Image: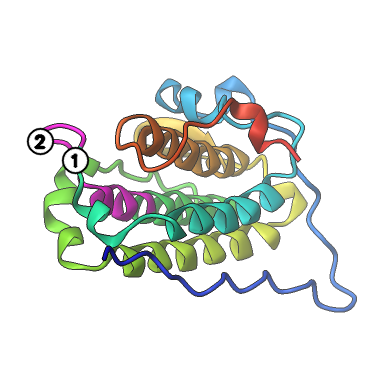
Amino acid sequence: MERRFRAPPLMPASPPEQGSQLTTVPAPPGDDEYGSFYAGYVHRVPSAVDIVELLARQGEETVGRFRAVPEPRGARRYAPGKWTVKEVVVHLSDTERIMAYRALRIARGDDTPLPGFDENAYTPHSGADAHALAALVAEWAQVRLATVALFRHVPTEAWTRRGTASGAPISVRALAWIIAGHERHHLETLAERYELWAPSKSRSELAP
């Protein structure tokens, strides 16, 4: 009998401290706030959305999707040489950590140009396939909790602050949109090519 994923529920995001001022929900980033490579991710996210709440909801929904995935499916590749499901999950964690780190530095006023990274070079060194799918998804869930906590406390004026990453301008709010859209992109791939679940209808599913 196939063993299915059982992850503990995500801990709810901490409520704001008494007397604290909530950050203003940012408008979507302009096209000049990110490199063209990221446009496909940004455009997967609806414009009229509370991006922080969306990131929190994505975390819950994605963990829920993986609960129905049998553990052996974690080793699946949709074609020779392509990543396994486990490697995709680790890639989600890696990328989100890097994007959130960029957002942190830029939000704090650090104008140091930040280097790019090569996800294809990272994957062979990740050791993803040595771990249970359930453990990797649980790790990603903790990464998402940290991301949400970071953005929940970004000062209002910092959302539009810009820096440089991978040789291109990038804003804090663009990084939040990229994280959400990047996850969406890979969930679509897991549905359509890995056939882990039914494909989503459209990006409108992300709307509140």
Q: Is residue 170 above or below residue 66?
A: above
In the image shown, does 150 or 124 lie closer to the viewer? 124
Could you tell me residue 197's position as x and y percent? 43, 41
Q: Position of residue 157 (x, y in %)?
A: 74, 48
Colour scheme: rainbow
Viewer-proximal residue among 184 and 160: 184
How crowded pointer 2 is (Cα within 10 Å; few <14, some 14-19, many 20+) is rated as few
Quarter occupied by residue 206: top right
| 2 and 1 marks in contact (CB < 8 Å) | yes
In-image side of 188 versus 177 (left or right): left
Find out whether residue 140 is within the magenta segment.
Answer: no
Task: Depth check: give the residue in front, 79 or 152.
Answer: 79
Find the magenta span and give its range.
78-92
Pick the front one: 52 or 134: 134
Tell me what residue is drawn at x 28 percent, y 61 percent.
Answer: 71
Q: How many numbered marks does the figure carry?
A: 2
Q: Amino acid at mark 2?
A: Gly
- Relative image position of residue 23 (x, y in whole percent): 78, 56
Q: Which residue lies under the disc numbered 1?
A: 77
Q: Amino acid at mark 1?
A: Arg
Binning the other alpha carbons within 10 Å of mark 1 as few (below 14), some (14 to 19) or many (20 upward) gives some
**Residue that lies at the very extreme toward the right in this rendered image:** 19
Quadrant showing the C terminus: top right
The image quarter in which residue 148 lies? bottom right
Which quarter of the image is occupied by the N terminus? bottom left
42 sits left or right of 92 in the view: right
Which secondary structure lies at badge 2?
loop
Q: CA distance from mark 2 to mark 1?
A: 8 Å
Q: Which residue is mark 2?
A: 81
Rendered residue at 61%/32% (across/down): 45
